[in-house]
Image (tube, helix red, strand yellow):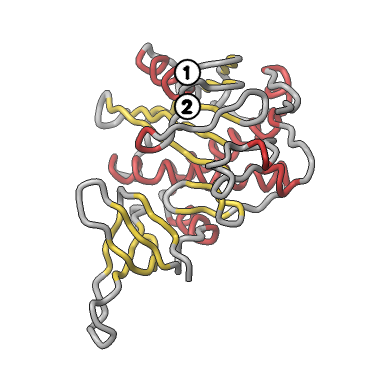
Amino acid sequence: MSSSAPLSLDRIRSTLATESLGQILYLHQALPSTNTEAAALARAGALHGTVVIAESQSSGYGRHGRAWFSPPGLNIYCSIIVRGMGDNLSLAQWLSWVPLVSALAATEAIQQTAAVSLSLKWPNDLLLHERKVGGILCESSVATINDPIVVIGIGLNVNVPPLSFPEELQPIAASLLEASRQPIDRNRLIAQLLLELEQCLGELRSSGSVRLRQAYMARCATLGRHVRVLFTNDHPIVGIAEALSADGALQVRTVPPHPRSQPMPLVDVRAADVIHLRE
């Protein structure tokens, strides 16, 4: 598996235009997990905006602890420490929206840097033609009610040749290389990602989620789809994903038991696996 141009702190900083995110940058050749490393730094008092990047991960993971394919020299694995939340949202709203706007920021950065348009699968998967290109994993801790700490982990398949994915992932995974048809500068993409993320989080802090909700919905491939929702501690449901609530929940109208039944009420889904069903 051939590698792309290596990551470099100097090259990332050469196009970095943020005020806080990435002003403290750690770049490792290999880590078990950037989220684990960033969480340890956060517990030790690392400043808001500290970023941990790795060329490879030996124990990368996504939601529910699922292993994340993390070959060296091809992709982006980074984690950002975010402290505080502003005064316009409750703690629950902040923690609900951060993963969604992080995914939105990633799609915007990819559009700007690589001219590749991705869609979003609720809550925070990045899709290219229904195959997963990237994902967001946010892990939070709350020192005080007004000073939550969130580690935003971002994994993006950037320059992986399609046939280099493990056989079991080839039907469901994709990389930006497939759409761009040429290697993508990961250093520039990281810098743009941090800028888009800083702007989205800044807007969420200062103005709330109104415009960001509209921008997310415009990219969300889940809305309007038949979906199966798998809860951790409840029975699954099947229905149509109709809307996104003010707090970022996916609103699903379940299928009625009989064709002539009254419409079923909307179910607000806040924590679950959502599967797009074939139409």
Label 2 near label 1: C-beta < 8 Å? yes
| Secondary-structure class at tag 1 | loop
Q: Residue at x 53, y 21 (%)?
A: 52
Q: Nearer the viewer, residue 9 or 82?
A: 9
- Where does residue 8 sit, x and y in percent of width and height? 70, 18
User: Of all residues shown, which one is farthest toward the top?
Assistant: 44
Q: Quadrant of the N terminus?
A: top right
- Where does residue 74 sit, x and y in percent of width and height? 67, 29
Place residue 237 in its image quadrant.
bottom left
Q: Residue at x 71, y 46 (%)?
A: 178
Q: Is residue 143 above or below residue 223?
A: above
Q: Residue at x 45, y 69 (%)?
A: 224
Q: Nearer the viewer, residue 120 or 108?
A: 120
Around disc 1, counting alpha carbons within 10 Å, would you say few (fewer than 14), some (14 to 19), or many (20 or more)? some
Q: Which labelled disc corresponds to residue 60? A: 2
Residue with the mark numbered 1: 32
* Type of the residue with mark 1: Pro
Q: Nearer the viewer, residue 128 or 16?
A: 128
